[in-house]
Image (cartoon, rainbow, N blue to C red):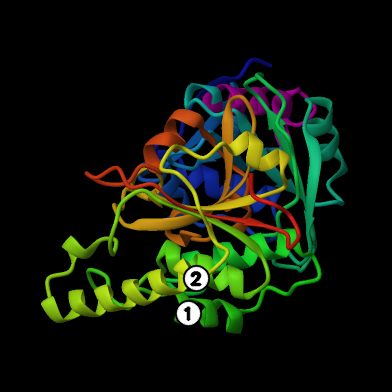
Amino acid sequence: MNFIYRLAQPADVDELLVLENQCFESDRLNARSFHWMVTRANARLIVALGDQPEQRLAGYALVLFHRGTSLGRLYSLAISDAARGQGLGQQLLAQAEQHALERECAYLRLEVRPDNAPAIRLYERNGYRLFDRIDDYYEDHAPALRYEKRIREHATGVARHVPYYPQTLDFSCGPACLLMAMKALQPPRAMQRHEELQIWREATTVFMTSGHGGCSPQGLALAALRRGFVVGLQVSVRGPLFLAGVRSEEKREVMRLVHEEFSRELAGSTVRQLGSAPLNLRQLQQDNGLALVLISSYRLTRSKAPHWVLVTGCDDDFVYLHDPDIDHSQQRQAMDCQYMPVSHKEFAGMSCFGADKLRAAVVLYRHGQSLI
């Protein structure tokens, strides 16, 4: 049978629901989710249309995209009973990859149940590799197998395992990144919320434009030093950061005082001051170092707020990031925020912040290593 492929429309939702209920016993998308995917989501919902009345909507593939990155996620693939055995799964997978390529994705990732042998055969036959397993993933507490395929072939990345920890508060991205870096360099360490909050207390600048303050690079560097790591600090501008965004002179004065105390403590410490040039990420990777980098989150979320991410690696084409901020409003889960491939050009843009081109990073090594 020949199938016709197009993007889903709001009028398809009723048929999509019938197909969803036919294919899945749990973890189903509902009508509201389908409407959102069709009309608002950063996604492509591809439907396959058959030429028989009973096969009008024969299947679908849903691909989600992560703004600012080169990563796509095959969120769901479904085939009607009447269309099975006709190669539609293979064709829908090819359609999903093509749409991901059109969105300049280099990687496509997916999750599948270990007991779904036909789907696993399909993915492995098409070059997907197993790279992770997540326990208690589905509604019935079954685990998920994570598969990945590099659909845009360039250089081969250098993989290394870095644990993931999501920030638990809007203002604790820096502490979350520091917990991940410390755990990667010292695997026996725990990543616990009480330490996330303790690091925030040590490293915060107290005030920002509104609400609780974020963590300064100086504060995070000192927090890492107190925990026994070799630390490098990059801050390309002088004085307290983001002072101009605070209206209250009283708050600005508090920020100045906190910054001055951090500076005095740093002056008598072993923290090495790094230059203002972009970090040599490849050398950092070779030396088994990890960098917390302050970025403008605009390219990821369309918010211009400063945000800490952790660089987990790089290759000739991409910088790979752990982003501790899980945006559930975009149907994201923790796995969507791990090892996010970002082009070197995108990363250079997001890590050069504001009108004064701020570069800020905290680099960690194991105790006993030397900074080059």
Q: Check residue 268 in the rendering and tell me which mark sits there, or answer none.
A: 2
Q: How many marks?
A: 2
Alpha carbon of mark 2 to alpha carbon of mark 1: how far? 17 Å
x and y percentages locating residue 219 in the rendered image: 45, 70
Instruction: Decide if residue 59 is on the left or right side of residue 307.
Output: right
Residue at 68% in and 41% down: 285
Which structural element holds mark 2? loop
- Which quarter of the rendered picture does the C terminus lie within? top right
x and y percentages locating residue 197 in the rendered image: 52, 81
Q: Considering only vertical position in the picture, is 160 above or below 367?
A: above
Question: Label 1, on which residue?
Answer: 202
Furthest-top residue in this view: 2
Instruction: Decide if residue 232 is on the left or right side of residue 297.
Output: right
Q: Amino acid at mark 1?
A: Glu
Q: Which residues are magenta?
A: 82-100
x and y percentages locating residue 169 in the rendered image: 46, 74
> Residues at badges 2 and 1 in contact (C-beta under 8 Å)?
no
Instruction: Decide if residue 244 is on the left or right side of residue 152.
Output: left
x and y percentages locating residue 144 in the rendered image: 77, 55
Identify the image quadrant of residue 346. top left
Depth order, front residue of 138/318: 318
Task: State yes or no: residue 131 in magenta.
Answer: no
Q: Amino acid at mark 2?
A: Gly
Identify the image quadrant of residue 283. top right
